[in-house]
Image (cartoon, rainbow, N blue to C red):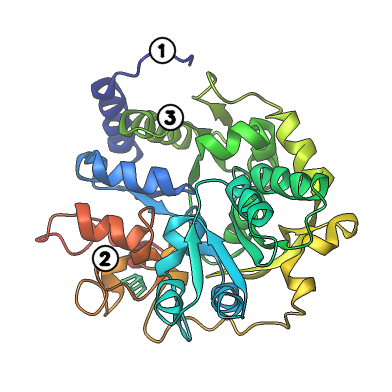
Amino acid sequence: MTGQAIDSRESLSRLNDAARRLQREVRYMEVCGTHTVNAFRSGLHSLMPPNVTLLSGPGCPVCVTSQGDIDQLIELSLQSGVIMCTYGDMIRVTGQRGSLEEARALGADVRIVYSALDAVRLAAAEPRRQVIFAGVGFETTAPATAVAILEADRLALMNFTVFVSHKLIIPAMQALLKSEVNIDGFVCPGHVSVVIGSDAFRPIVEQYWLSCVITGFEGPQIAAALARLCELTLSGQAALENLYPQAVTSTGNQHAWKLIEQVFTPANVHWRGLSELPGSGLEIRGRYARFNARVRYELAAADNREPPGCRCGEVITGRCTPADCKLFGTVCTPIQPIGPCMVSSEGTCQAWFKYRPRNRAQSPTPIRSAV
Ligand code: SF4
């Protein structure tokens, strides 16, 4: 398929046709926060055949950030003289001692930035303050963090550090496939694929015999990917297909990768819901260690226990739905969120709360019964 406009009716018709002929339940998973939101916002879940379930995987950057990282960011923000810079969604995620928003109410200087370079500029303008940037997100945001560190190096800034919590999507997908969660194929993320390239998903197809279909962000594009996945399942094939060729190449963005490799090295990191995964994150190389907030502030290993009652870790690994969480929609709402999946605009719990009809509390094909 090329970058032509997608006919949603045709995709849904193909999806329904393949699903009907399959005559069994199938579960596909997207691993992209934008897919999570847009699948709900477009009404796609309501239009899907009853035997097809689209699970939301670990694709929301805020949601996968470990509880320990959240706590350490809050702890750092409360240190004297520190300016904590973060992307917007992180500010309301709660740790054991409240959120960055609550830390701000206690006097912490927490600022929302729109790019990592904004934090570097702030450090240059405030030489008496220590500026810490919260580097969160997948391969999409890591190059921008790398650029910020290189710029801080060029400016010889001594008051800029990064708390790196960047994650790599392929190790998380592989960890899911080794777990008890039953998945029939992946709807692969468009924007991460722009950086890592379609070939990065080949090990999933070849080692786990599971189809990976890369697609764009809109409902019709997600519907097209689901139709293709269902057709592949029906034909007994495992294939890697790129339905987003206008943006995704086989090898990805080499310039972005070079920046990542120049500044970072792979690291074992903790994921919410997946525990510690080898080589699944990034840490700053020794050459740039002076910009590493974990080194500068001598941070010890953190406690990764999730908030009591919150099942975000299970939600983002397809082991339960938000409706299975007793706090959903009562104690935990977008106005007063408990876990990151309700905080983040890309979180599964927030998407369920906003877009699922209230009289359909449960999934039409409950995920629990299918796993
Ligand atoms: Fe966590 Fe709230 Fe989602 Fe429950 S509804 S899993 S408490 S974010």
Front residue of 272 and 292: 292
Point out the frontmost of discs 3 and 1. Answer: 1
Disc 2 C-beta below 8 A from ligand 1:
no
**Ligand 1 within 8 Å of the CB at mark 3:** no
Q: Name the residue under label 2.
A: 334
Q: How crowded is mark 2: few (under 14 residues within 10 Å), some or many (20 or more)?
A: some
- Kindly identify which numbered label has been placed on residue 228: 3
**What amino acid does circle 2 point to?**
Pro
Q: SS at mark 3? A: helix
Residue type at the position of mark 3 = Arg
Residue 360, position in %: x, y? Answer: 14, 59
At 23% from the left and 23% from the top, the residue drawn is: 9
Question: Mark 3 or 1 closer to N-term?
Answer: 1
* Element carrying mark 1: loop
Across and down, in percent, residue 200 comes to 69, 38
Give the residue number, with chain letter if any, for mark 1. Answer: 4
Residue 152, percent across and down? 76, 50
Tell whether 72 sits left or right of 261. Answer: left
Q: In terms of depth relative to the viewer, which is nearer, 250 or 339?
A: 339
Q: In the image, is residue 18 above or below residue 289?
A: above
Q: Which comes before the other along the chain, label 1 or label 2?
A: 1
Dot 2 or dot 3: first in sequence order is 3
Q: Do the residues labelled 3 and 1 touch (CB within 8 Å)?
A: no
The kind of residue tagged 1 is Gln
Q: Can you name the residue that lies furthest to the right here?
A: 287
SS of the residue under disc 2: loop
